[in-house]
Image (tube, rainbow, N blue to C red):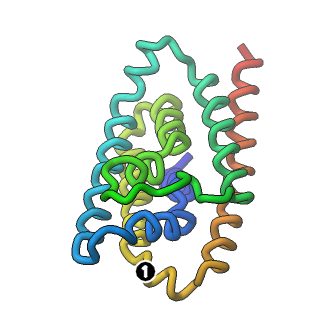
Amino acid sequence: MDIFTAATTLFLIMDPLGNVPVFISLLKNVAPERRRLVLIRELVIAYAVMLIFLLLGQHLLKFLSLKQESISIAGGIVLFLIAIRMIFPQEGGIMGEQADEEPFIVPLAIPMVAGPSTLAALLLMAQSSPKKMTSWVMALTAAWLVTAAILLASPLFFRLLKQRGLTAMERLMGMLLVMMSVQMFLNGLAEYLRK
């Protein structure tokens, strides 16, 4: 996997276009002058979590005695479930009912941006090619920057695409993620059966 492919994969998993309506909904009760600051804070927290997970995730795997195949299979399953939720959204949104307070870390930073499938993909990249860590950091940073730009421009995207356009984009991304999750699962299974 090269940097471009890794960045594209991470971008699709983070699903910023699919998250635009969720972010708008969760921030609607926040004072308008604080929305951008809250959004930037949550994006920075998500980036920090993902970077720590990318750099230290291998040590966690060793500590828990987990193998690359199990990460690939588990990541494929989690990614598949999230992709299915993107294609067939549930009533009440991804996080259910919204609290009336300003969101902090949950749910905007984690799991909306730094979700379980993103963390699983980062673990898999670090585990499969630890010598390419600089490339993985660059891919993560690129995917995060594009995601951050889209989410910061979420009011504009919402006005341009409307709810139907955003739903269509989310479902298209969900279809791509289904294919990627099946491939991730099959790669892990093939590797397991080879041993």
Q: Residue at x 74, y 58 (%)?
A: 88
Depth check: give the residue in front, 193 or 185. Answer: 185
Instruction: Residue 135: tell me if it is visible.
Output: no
* Neighbourhood count class around disc 1 (C-alpha, 10 Å): few under 14, some 14–19, many 20 upward: some
Residue 186, by quadrant, is top right
Q: Is residue 20 above or below residue 98?
A: below
Q: Position of residue 123 (x, y in %)?
A: 48, 33
Depth check: give the residue in front, 118 or 42. Answer: 42
Q: Is residue 65 above or below residue 95?
A: above
Q: Residue at x 74, y 51 (%)?
A: 179
The C terminus lies in which quarter of the figure?
Answer: top right
The residue under label 1 is: 155
Depth check: give the residue in front, 150 or 192. Answer: 150
Q: Position of residue 94 (x, y in %)?
A: 57, 54
Q: Secondary structure at mark 1?
A: helix
Q: Residue at x 44, y 53 (%)?
A: 113
Q: Is residue 118 above or below residue 190?
A: below
Q: Position of residue 118 (x, y in %)?
A: 50, 45
Q: Amino acid at mark 1?
A: Pro
Instruction: Residue 140: tell me if it is visible.
Output: yes
Most extreme residue toward the bottom, as rendered?
160
Asked whether, in this view, residue 124 is left or right of residue 164, the answer is left
